[in-house]
Image (spheres, rainbow, N blue to C red):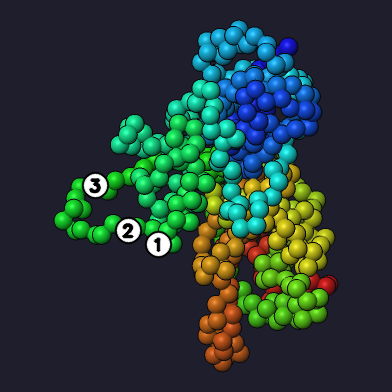
Amino acid sequence: MAEKFLMPKLSPTMEEGQISRWVKNEGDTFEANETLAEVDTDKATMEMTALSGGTLLKILKTGGETAALGEAIAIIGDKGEDISALLGESRSNGGSAEKPKESAASASNGIVSMEQPDPAPAGATPSAPDEPASETAENPVEPTASTASASRKNESNGRMIVSPIASRMAVDNGVDLRSISGSGPNGRIIKRDIEAAMLQSEKPAVKPFTPSAVVGASPFRDENTSKMRQVIAGRLAESIGPIPTFYLTVEIEMDNALALRKQINAALDEGVKISVNDIIVKVVAMSLIRHPFVNASYQDKTIRFYERADIGVAVAIDEGLITPVIRGANLKGFAEIGAEIRDLAEKAKAKKLQPEQYTGATFSISNLGMMGIKEFTAIINPPEAGILAIGAATAMPVVRDGEVVVRNIMSVTMSCDHRVIDGATGAKFLQTFKQLLENPMLMLV
């Protein structure tokens, strides 16, 4: 019997999903456990896998379009079934989200799970796929403000439809979008079109600069934000306004920590190394256990104290920022922490993190030192009570025992939720953090 195929909830923070591409085309049959489509959520690209066999009778949401939770995105059933009633119902609803039964969300859609797509081939950009499975969809839909396609004016039909990934690739590589014919639905310019244009010319054509022609306000384009960027914006708005935040900054002499790192790396197997950030994560975790109010969160009428230090480590990716979590960092060694951070960072950049790998941290670290930033402040990630902003360790002259010597000094700023952390509490935490980094042997006590 034909039925609607509804958009399911794929992550804890998801409110809607964007169809990356349909793997199956209209009229295709599928077996149980076959992938039907890929969906971009706020954190990753996931696969929709069929629970039982059937036929994809009609695609209601094409590649690049967005659907709310519970909204019909396709109709599935037996080959040749009459779906006019379901189509009429979808049109009369105006594409609005339906309210599926909580316990039947999977079975009613024929979905058994949402899994990560296969890793991208070597050399491919680790980003969400944007090429549709079918370029001859029966009723391609013109992208609107709710879709992920950026629309621009075109000489031939008044609109140029460009996927976000293709647009970013064009800007990064100097490709003129006006010179490209899109191969996607409705002439949509997609990733493979940009890649083809880049292969045709090593040096994209650049228009000569003519000062006399540069007049008026700068031209611009609007691109719909990704789901990840929308979630980041929402969570930061929740943080900086409602949370009473104050900041504490301390300078730490890093020479002993750098010497420790050198000694450890010399003793490790070839190809296995730890970073300064790995040491910082371990020291933060140990300090949190000694200062429970920093390893806590405000819960309206209660304060929740965490018994383990689960550290969120900020990782920059193309579409924003994500914080993979190192669980029980206070219980792990430097090498284990380093290996885990590298693994999670690679998955984050490939959009392959599972929700349990980036949610539920008790405290976070943002390290911009490797980018040459000496000092900055970071925004608290609710419901955590604090976050450390780590700057670069810079060689500078300091006075020690009445003499001027050169030391590697690192600036650290802690953002504190005043509902949980008082000034003295935050200062004592930073004292412990500073003491352990400047005297690493104390970590053994």
Which is more toward the observer, 191 or 386?
191
Of the image marks 3 and 2, the number of the one nearer the N terminus: 2
Query: Seen in the image, is 133 located left or right of residue 170?
Result: right
**Which residue bears the numbered disc 1?**
203
Q: Which residue is drawn at 61% across and 73% down?
A: 252
Q: Which mark is residue 206?
A: 2
**Residue 85 percent across, percent down from the top left:** 60, 7
Vertically, is 337 above or below 269? above
Mark 1–mark 2 distance (CA, rounded to whole Å)? 8 Å
- Mark 1 Cα within 10 Å, few/some/many (few <14, many 20+)? few
Q: Can residue 379 be seen in this view?
A: no
Decide: is 412 above or below 162: below
Q: Is residue 97 visible?
A: yes
For disc 2, the neighbor class at 10 Å (few under 14, some 14 to 19, many from 20) is few
- Residue furthest to the bottom: 403
Give the secondary structure at mark 1.
loop
Q: Earlier in the sequence, mark 3 or mark 1?
A: 1
Task: Say how many tags the image has.
Answer: 3
Give the residue number, with chain letter if any, for mark 3: 217
Secondary structure of residue under mark 3: loop
Q: Give how far apart the Cα atoms at labels 3 and 2 are.
A: 21 Å
Residue 103: % across, % down: 77, 21
- Which residue is drawn at the image coordinates 67% and 67% (left, top)? 277
**Mark 3: few/some/many CA within 10 Å (<14, 14-19, 20+):** few
